[in-house]
Image: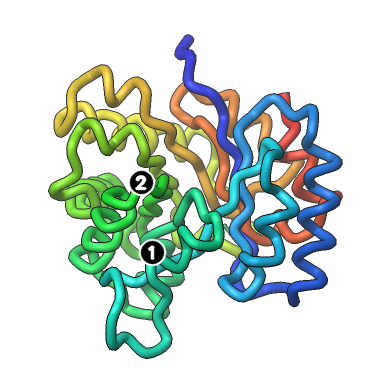
Amino acid sequence: MSDRSYYIAGNWKMHKTRAEAAELAKALVAELKDGKHKYLVAPTFTSLETVGPVVKGTNIRLGAQNMAAEEQGAHTGEVSVLQLKDLGVQTVILGHSERRHIYGEDDALINKKVRLALRHGLEVILCIGELLEEREAGRAEAVCETQTVKGLEGVSAGELSNVVIAYEPVWAIGTGKTATPEDADAIHAWVRKVIGKLYGADCAEKIIIQYGGSVKAENAAQLMAKENIDGALVGGAALKPDTFAPIAKFG
Ligand code: PGA
């Protein structure tokens, strides 16, 4: 068995006002204080300044859901890595399927963001995952391989220790359809092999690969029991302490 630890992250997406975000964060700090895994919450940009002090010094990291590919400058509507760091953000989620498929982010742009975030010492959760038609066409592995390879272009082995991969099949996100633990594990194993080819066996063994897509209390333990699943990136179920805490405290 590996010594990889589990990493459970909550992606709050475009939900919650500052007051609601603070309330959720406070409840999670209390619920998870004895939790034995690694934790993260990723509120919207507007709630980072509110949630930051609530989770500071606890076992819950502060994450952002996206960032600009440039450090600063004339980029209306974007948020810079420097601004995130100023708020105490430790981790940034990049390449989420909603960024890829609703907002048209491609692998080259995501890679630019990954490199910038790592250069500034942020931990990166790089999301990958295939569409339903890609899975049905037998292309799930190829799509995930391409997104991994291109997303990590120019990232050194040293920097890779600050990278987490989140495998989120697009057809499972927010749909209530979870990948079976076997199907998810097969892709995780494949991605680990891809990392092995790029960085060697040691890095492949150590890298954390989260699963995301309709994770809930009822399926978390079965997913995490799989050899290659090291955590979860949780959307809908991350919005309430009652649904997130049981996932975060599984096992
Ligand atoms: P979900 O979202 O848990 O609501 O499916 C997961 C994600 O998009 O990160």
**Residue beneath disc 2:** 121
| Coordinates of residue 1 in the picture (x, y in percent) | 48, 9
Q: Is residue 18 left or right of residue 212?
A: right
| Coordinates of residue 11 in the picture (x, y in percent) | 60, 58
Is the C-beta of the residue carrying label 1 under 8 Å from the nearest atom of ligand 1?
no
Could one spot residue 209 in this view of the protein?
yes
**Residue beneath disc 1:** 81
Give the SS element for disc 1: helix
Residue ID at (28%, 88%)? 74
As displayed, is residue 187 above or below residue 75? above
Tell me where residue 43 sits by quadrant.
Answer: bottom right
Residue ID at (75%, 42%)? 217
Q: Nearer the viewer, residue 205 or 65?
A: 65
* For marks 1 and 2 on the same chain, the one whose residue lies earlier in the sequence: 1
Tell me where residue 190 sits by quadrant.
Answer: top left
| Coordinates of residue 191 in the picture (x, y in percent) | 30, 37
